[in-house]
Amino acid sequence: MNVAELQPIATLIRDHRWAALATQGSEGPEASWVAYVAEEGFSGFLLHLSRLAAHTRNLLDNPRACLAISEQDKESGDPQELARVMIQGRVAIIPAETTDYRASASRYIHCLPQAKRLFTFSDFLLLRLTPTKARFVGGFARAYTLDAGQLQEAAAFP
């Protein structure tokens, strides 16, 4: 893929912090909204979620998930022209009391400082969605499927 294809993906991911999270519930698919923090090289996406939330319980039962990030609606024009990326992957708990947890929590709080107080709540888990593939739609007739390596290539663009 070339710069013209990868740059908008990196911009979309970096310019947002709120995404739809699709999980599989006991009665079918469910979607909710969550904050996320992209890790270096888009190798993972950090989620800090409460065990009390249905989406977290769904992830503990079935770790396959998808994050959907969209350009903000301009409230004019065709909304189907909005850029969006869907990042599919598997979610795993980052074990507390590990170096990985401390580094990931620090990154999360650095990017979302308002979340710091939530790290004191015992029902919250720090999770990592590790991408397996992504689908980018940049508007009409501009769609690309990327594997995890190509998504990491996109991260190289400012």
Image (cartoon, rainbow, N blue to C red):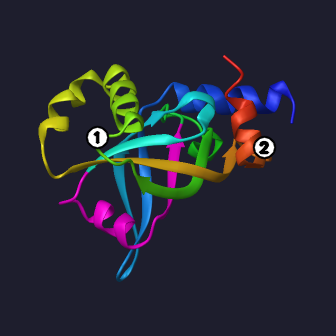
The span picked out in magenta is: 50-70
Q: Is residue 26 visible?
A: yes
Magenta stretch contains residue 4 = no
Q: What residue type is labelled 2?
A: Arg
Q: Give left or right: position of 24 versus 83.
A: left
Label 2 belongs to which residue? 142
Give the quadrant of the N terminus.
top right
Q: Which mark is residue 151?
A: none
Q: Which residue is at 53% across, 40% downward?
A: 70
Which is closer to the viewer, label 1 or label 2?
1
Q: Give left or right: position of 105 versus 13.
A: left
Image coordinates of residue 116 in percent, x first then y, are 21, 28
Q: Which residue is at 35% across, 83% downward?
A: 27
Mark sitting earlier along the chain (1/2)? 1
Image coordinates of residue 111 in percent, x first then y, are 37, 23
* 17, above or below 132, in the image: above
Q: Which amino acid does label 1 sit on?
A: Glu
Q: Which residue is at 32% across, 62% downward?
A: 55
Q: Give left or right: position of 117 versus 151.
A: left
Label 1 belongs to which residue? 97
Displayed quadrant of residue 118: top left
Under tag 2, what secondary structure?
A: loop
Residue found at the very far right of the displayed protein: 2
Residue found at the very far bottom of the displayed protein: 27
Magenta stretch contains residue 52 = yes
Q: Give left or right: position of 135 versus 108.
A: right
Under tag 1, what secondary structure?
A: loop
